[in-house]
């Protein structure tokens, strides 16, 4: 059974930085794509960034230039470097992994940005 474990969230001041990590276990191979989504209170979950097995990346317009997604050497690890944090970045950040028609989700890690 595939499990995704996020870490690295926390409370930071506006303008600060964080690095989120996600490690997948229980998978025999690498995923087609991994990514990060976030859900703020009272809002729907939204895409933040994704990266394919080939290294192609995609970012939400709201985070371009501030967030960087990357995959680790183990292939089943994904990171999200978050810079120039804004209060509106406050949300629970979820790791996602896709393999064929299957999608897997982590439990989420809270990021809170104070103004």
Image (cartoon, rainbow, N blue to C red):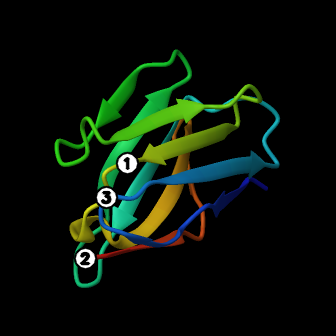
Asked if residue 102 can be seen in this view, the reply is no
**Quadrant location, the C terminus:** bottom left
Task: Please tell me how many numbered marks the rendered image carries.
Answer: 3
Q: Which mark is residue 83?
A: 1
Q: Residue furthest top?
A: 54
Residue 87 drawn at (x, y percent):
25, 71
Residue 56 shows in the view: yes
Q: Residue at x 46, y 30 (%)?
A: 51
Q: Is residue 40 above or below residue 77?
A: below
Q: Residue at x 77, y 30 (%)?
A: 74
Q: CA distance from mark 3 to mark 1?
A: 7 Å
Above-or-below relation of 11 to 76 = below
Residue at label 2? 115
Secondary structure type for disc 2: loop
What residue is at 56 percent from the left and 53 percent from the top? 20
Residue assigned mark 3: 15
Which is nearer the eye, 106 or 114?
Answer: 114
Q: CA distance from mark 1 to mark 2?
A: 15 Å
How packed is label 3: few (under 14 Cα within 10 Å), some, or many (20 or more)? some
Q: Nearer the viewer, residue 111 or 39?
A: 111
Q: Residue 91: horizontal and vertical position, in percent?
A: 36, 72
């Amino acid at each position: 059974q595939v499990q995704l474990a996020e870490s690295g969230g926390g409370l930071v001041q506006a303008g600060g930085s964080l690095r989120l990590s996600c490690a997948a276990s229980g998978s025999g191979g690498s995923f087609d794509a991994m990514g990060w989504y976030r859900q703020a209170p009272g809002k729907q979950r939204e895409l933040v960034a994704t990266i394919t097995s080939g290294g192609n990346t995609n970012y939400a317009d709201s985070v371009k230039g501030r967030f960087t997604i990357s995959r680790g050497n183990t292939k089943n690890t994904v990171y999200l470097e978050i810079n120039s944090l804004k209060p509106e970045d406050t949300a629970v950040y979820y790791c996602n992994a896709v393999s064929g028609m299957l999608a897997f989700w982590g439990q989420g890690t809270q990021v809170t940005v104070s103004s």
